[in-house]
Amino acid sequence: MFWTDCQLTWDASAFGGLGNLVVPFKYLWVPDLTLYDSTADDFPGYEDYRVNIYSDGSVYYNFPTIVQSRCLVDVERFPYDTQTCGMTFGSWSHHGYEMDLVYKNPYGDLSSSVMNVEWSISTFTAARHVLYYGCCIEPYPDVTYYLTIKRKPAFYIVNIIIPTFLITGMGILGFFLPVESGEKVSLQITVMLALAVFQLLVADSLPPSADATPLIAIYFNFCLFLVGFACVMAVVALTIHYQQTSAMRRWMVTLFLRILSKVTWVYVPKIHDDTKDNDKNSATQLDVSSPSPIQANGKKTTKINVLPANTKIGTEADKPKSKPTINVTAEHWKSLAKVVDRIACIAFILMGFIGTGIVFSKFTPD
């Protein structure tokens, strides 16, 4: 702190060239500097050091202290967050007409700052405000220092984000595990439990806040949803693989065994459709016989059978209707299970990439 006291002036030449004095704190008037948002009971070091006085009335008081201030933290972009904390200094008993308060430099002095393992200082600026309170008509000036710090994310990337990627990626292996192994669902459940336990372990590293939910916590829940989806699809694939019925819905045959099987590269045995065979065997026959020669009185005649006039020939109503199901074998159900499993794997990968891209795109500053 620096101020001018007109009562503390003297002629240095009259005192042997003595230009400055160092006196104890208790013998001088010192401004009652107060940190408004302080969380400590006192201002440590404020009354423990000495004041330097110069012959022109200039007074310098520099003392070491520890400042503990309240700061609202926005943890939405943790661990890529940037925080700005304000420290407001002012007088508690003197108003602006008795003591004016200004800053010496618009920027704080960071020349002797010490490197921090978790935070790096971006800016340190000062601003002067003049406030009027309801109790008094006099103005109350204050000086606020704004400290902008940026979190170093390397520790959290190595210990939280990368392990989360690896554990979630283990869920893809469950889709490549054969159903006959009997460990398809067990693998997915194990991955899900590992991810849940890991989330509990890193929960202590996440700063608690009720105003905003960290995006990394949202990403953890998204990963749990992905692994849960993989677990459900493993159960569906097992159910289809061991299906005992011999009939399959026609739309399932058309969609999965004839269309999607080509996309997923799954071999499907040839399907024998009874309805098409019945269509060929039950083709409409006309009751018009081929002309055949008949001997009558030594002459060749032709016999023709004519159908009644109200007989319908070759109409759509005469054709048999298609059955809603098709008789298939157990191999077809196994092929259907593989198709469903591979489609779920593709959906798992797509949702993983899209969800990861959306979440981490929000880490970039606006």
Image: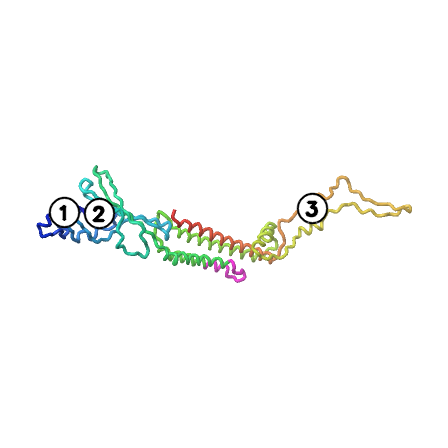
Residue at 54% x, 61% y: name it.
Answer: 180
Is residue 23 visible to the viewer in this orientation of the structure? Answer: no
How busy is the neighbourhood of tag 1: few (under 14 within 10 Å), some, or many (20 plus)? some
Q: Nearer the viewer, residue 38 or 279?
A: 38
Q: Is residue 178 magenta?
A: yes
Residue 203 x/y as whole percent = 37, 55
**Taking 206 as reference, is 135 left or right?**
left
- Mark 2–mark 1 Cα distance, whole angstroms, equals 27 Å
Q: Is residue 320 left or right of residue 197?
A: right
- The amino acid type, in three-letter code, at marker 2 is Thr
Residue 269 visible in the displayed image: yes
* Main SS, magenta residues: helix
- How many labels sit on residues? 3
Extent of the magenta region: 175-190
Q: Secondary structure at mark 1?
A: strand
At label 3, the amino acid type is: Lys
- In the picture of the structure, the residue carrying the numbered disc 1 is 56
Question: Circle 3 sits on which residue?
Answer: 319
The numbered disc on residue 34 is 2
Secondary structure found at label 3: loop
Q: Are marks 2 and 1 in contact (CB under 8 Å)?
A: no
What is the spatial separation of the Cα atoms under label 3 and label 1, in whole angstroms? 118 Å
In the structure shown, which secondary structural element does the residue marked by tag 2 occupy? strand
Q: Which residue ends up furthest to the bottom in the rendered image?
A: 181
Q: How far from the left and from the top, in percent, is residue 32?
A: 19, 46
Image x and y of residue 168, in percent:
45, 57
**218 part of magenta stretch:** no
